[in-house]
Amino acid sequence: SAVISQKPSRDICQRGTSLTIQCQVDSQVTMMFWYRQQPGQSLTLIATANQGSEATYESGFVIDKFPISRPNLTFSTLTVSNMSPEDSSIYLCSVEDWAGDLRRKGYTFGSGTRLTVV
Amino acid sequence: AQRVTQPEKLLSVFKGAPVELKCNYSYSGSPELFWYVQYSRQRLQLLLRHISRESIKGFTADLNKGETSFHLKKPFAQEEDSAMYYCALEYGNKLVFGAGTILRVKS
């Protein structure tokens, strides 16, 4: 299955600043996904990033707040802009992983970025 | 709307006891369901998927469309099973996660 490297693993940021999170995959993938996990909550999909097109955002998430780049088939970044304490969460990237066999289909996740905004 | 419900935040069992982690879903289409597990200080990883009807680490899960359930079961819990378990529903290449259940296996 795909191996994902995500960084930084954690950061403490001042409110009003921005943080860019990087996600690198060891194989070419069509779609990459960004999730947020707020404290004590489950994972919520922020957006889907396809190479060569604008990311598709879920309800409640906007490009100005969470701009995403997808310059090639193995890399993506998520920026958390103009941060406030409410943005303190774990952010995870994910890729679809199935090698063409539906019985082996799943999604692989990065190790996450734990963001604290002070 | 698509929804996954895991009614138990915490399930505590003794080693060797049977385990059942409940998952109910709401989806009008044909569901693709997964169980993910997160052990302490490790990343989220796929445990099993309904389409392959497999058994992983002794865990099984059967899709019951009539009850819209996908409960995770293991006949004899082990201490190393202690972790956070998430049920997830896939639709249109998106995953919707349940709130998760912490499984604690006591010795």
Image (cartoon, coloured by chain):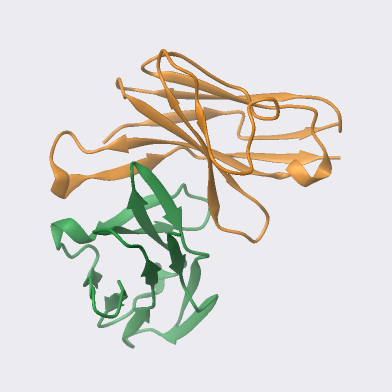
Q: Residue B16, percent across and down? A: 32, 86
Relative to B82, residue A20 above or below = above
Measuring 21% from the left and 61% from the top, which residue is drawn there? B50
Relative to A42, residue A69 above or below = above
Quadrant containing the N terminus of chain A is: top left
In-image side of B81 versus B60 (left or right): right
Total marks in image: 0
In-image side of B95 versus A6 (left or right): left
A88, B77: nearer the viewer: A88
Q: Residue A112, percent across and down? A: 55, 39
Measuring 27% from the left and 37% from the top, which residue is drawn there? A97
A32, B54: nearer the viewer: A32
Relative to B89, residue B107 above or below = below
Quadrant containing the C terminus of chain A is: top right
Colour of chain A as rendered: orange
Colour of chain B as rendered: green
Measuring 51% from the left and 57% from the top, which residue is drawn there? B40
A11, A15: nearer the viewer: A15
In-image side of B104 versus B63 (left or right): right
Q: Residue A21, percent across and down? A: 60, 26
Relative to A6, residue B97 above or below = below
Figure quadrant of residue A77: top right
Q: Residue B102, percent across and down? A: 51, 71
Measuring 53% from the left and 77% from the top, which residue is drawn there? B10
